[in-house]
Amino acid sequence: MKKVIVIFVAFLRMQCVGAQVVPADSTVIPADSTAMQADCKRYPLRALGEVALTCGAVHSFARYVMREEYAQSTMHSIHDNMRSGFAWDDDNFYLNNIGHTYQGSAYFNAARSIGLSFWQSVPYTFLGALAWEITCEKEQPSINDMIVTPVSGVLMGEISHRLVPAIVDERERGTKRAIRETLAAIANPIEGVHRLFSGRMWKVGPCKYAPPCGTAPDDESNTGFEVGLGDRLIAPANDFTPGTHQPYASFSIEYGNAADGETHTSIYDFFTIDGTFAFGKRQHVLSHLNITGRICSTPMKMKENMSAEIGLYQFFKYEDTHLKGDSTRSPFPYGEMASFGPGIILSFPRVSPHIRLEQNLFAHGVVLGAVKSDYYKFRNRTYNMGTGYGASSTSRLKWEKAGSLQLSAYFMHLFTWKGYEPKRPDDCTFENKHFDVLGDRSDARLLSISLKARINLSQHMGLTAGASYHLRHTHYKHHENRHAESCDIHAGLEWNL
């Protein structure tokens, strides 16, 4: 009997961590091993079927629940889409950035969540985007969607794939378990569906997370979660009279090791995410989302008590806030939908016995970005798209048990190189015309600076306060140049999870 019990316990442990035996209360998830990959069966046709089901589910929701006009596709519209070719579309900023990125992540995880590797899953994201543009929309296929959906979708998809093991704890029960499973399903809806229909969503076991064969990401033990609640006052710069108070909820995630002296070739084994949900009249619920994911990196030889690494990174940035008053002179919206560039991360673990300093510097090559237009207002689009370059920097000072201070700066120079040609400078009616353009012929400079301080009230809770400044200057070829500024101050509470 004793031998049977020993064998049974060993079997459970192997289910948790593949072929490795660790203590039953371990929260470590091993990286994919060669043996696990060899024993794991791949189902490429099943992955293709799940991409088709995902595409169909999103289309059905848009068509029958939301009753969106663009989703009323027919065989005739599909035939037209196949003949018409691709063009730049005029959808709103949220849909073109957040919507297609999230949709692309679902296509990616339709393959990734059933055992396919990262690179094996990438083509499915492209196929899902292509199928959507041709068969599910009653409008000309979009060039920008075919960039955003695969490129940013892969970034968000792999990140959400890695976050599920960091969120789910299959040892828990009741409310805590339900909250964790819900958050994991929001982050990765495909994996959520898999867990629901397989019964793993409510199954209790001795492991923190028991993934399907060969799909466990790298060690996620070094993952930090923070959430916050507060209020901010936002207004055009130098004039807080038309300012408005805006309650908000924020979150931030840091996954993996930024600078640990090791060479990294596993894509997105380190990433940071921070976002803000705004609550107020005429405000966009998601007003801010910033993602930085490491593609690869190598350590640099530095002095003692200092570590550094240089690498290649991918960026995603989304900023959209409504200003009260003369919102036509607003720096919002703006963002980067597809962006890559080199970066260096410096860490000074012990500047003094109780102080730690971190410094990040990144250069951005913007394949596709967007910035508010003062003139282009056609259908649902009020912004210009384009390509360009940029840079960002984050300096963070941490006092042990006391708090932290963070200074962030961001710059982007975006060029809208394919624009319409008005007959005269004031010809901006855009009525009953068909456009296939990036927006106004222009170049825009965007600058954002933010300062945030935190005072720790306990081990897991802190009081935060800060301010931000946003500046946009756009030079137009056919119109008067425009300048816009805004600033905000905010305060709230923040919790470490």
Image: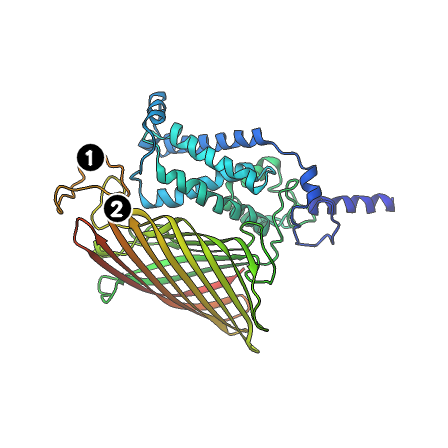
Q: In this view, does 322 lie to the left or right of 481?
A: right
Q: Which residue is identified by label 1?
A: 433
Q: Which residue is rendered at x = 16% and y = 53% of the image?
A: 480
Q: In this view, does 175 lie to the left or right of 381?
A: right
Image coordinates for residue 201, horizontal then vertical, percent: 59, 42
| Residue 4 image label | none
Which one is earlier in the sequence, the residue at label 1 or at label 2? 2
Up the image or down, 462 lies above or below 311; here it is: below
Of 290 and 259, nearer the camera is 259
The amino acid beneath tag 2 is Thr
Q: In the structure shown, which secondary structural element does the residue marked by tag 2 occupy?
A: loop
The CA distance from mark 1 to mark 2 is 15 Å
Image coordinates for residue 101, horizontal then vertical, percent: 43, 43
Image coordinates for residue 36, horizontal then vertical, percent: 69, 42
Snapshot quadrant of residue 394? bottom left
| Quadrant occupied by the N terminus | top right
Q: Residues within 10 Å of mark 1 (few under 14, many from 20)?
A: few
Is any part of residue 241 visible from this angle? yes
Snapshot quadrant of residue 66? top left
Q: Nearer the viewer, mark 1 or mark 2?
A: 1
| Residue 382 image label | 2
The amino acid beneath tag 1 is Lys
Q: In the structure shown, which secondary structural element does the residue marked by tag 1 occupy?
A: loop
Image coordinates for residue 272, horizontal then vertical, percent: 49, 56
Is any part of residue 455 visible from this angle? no
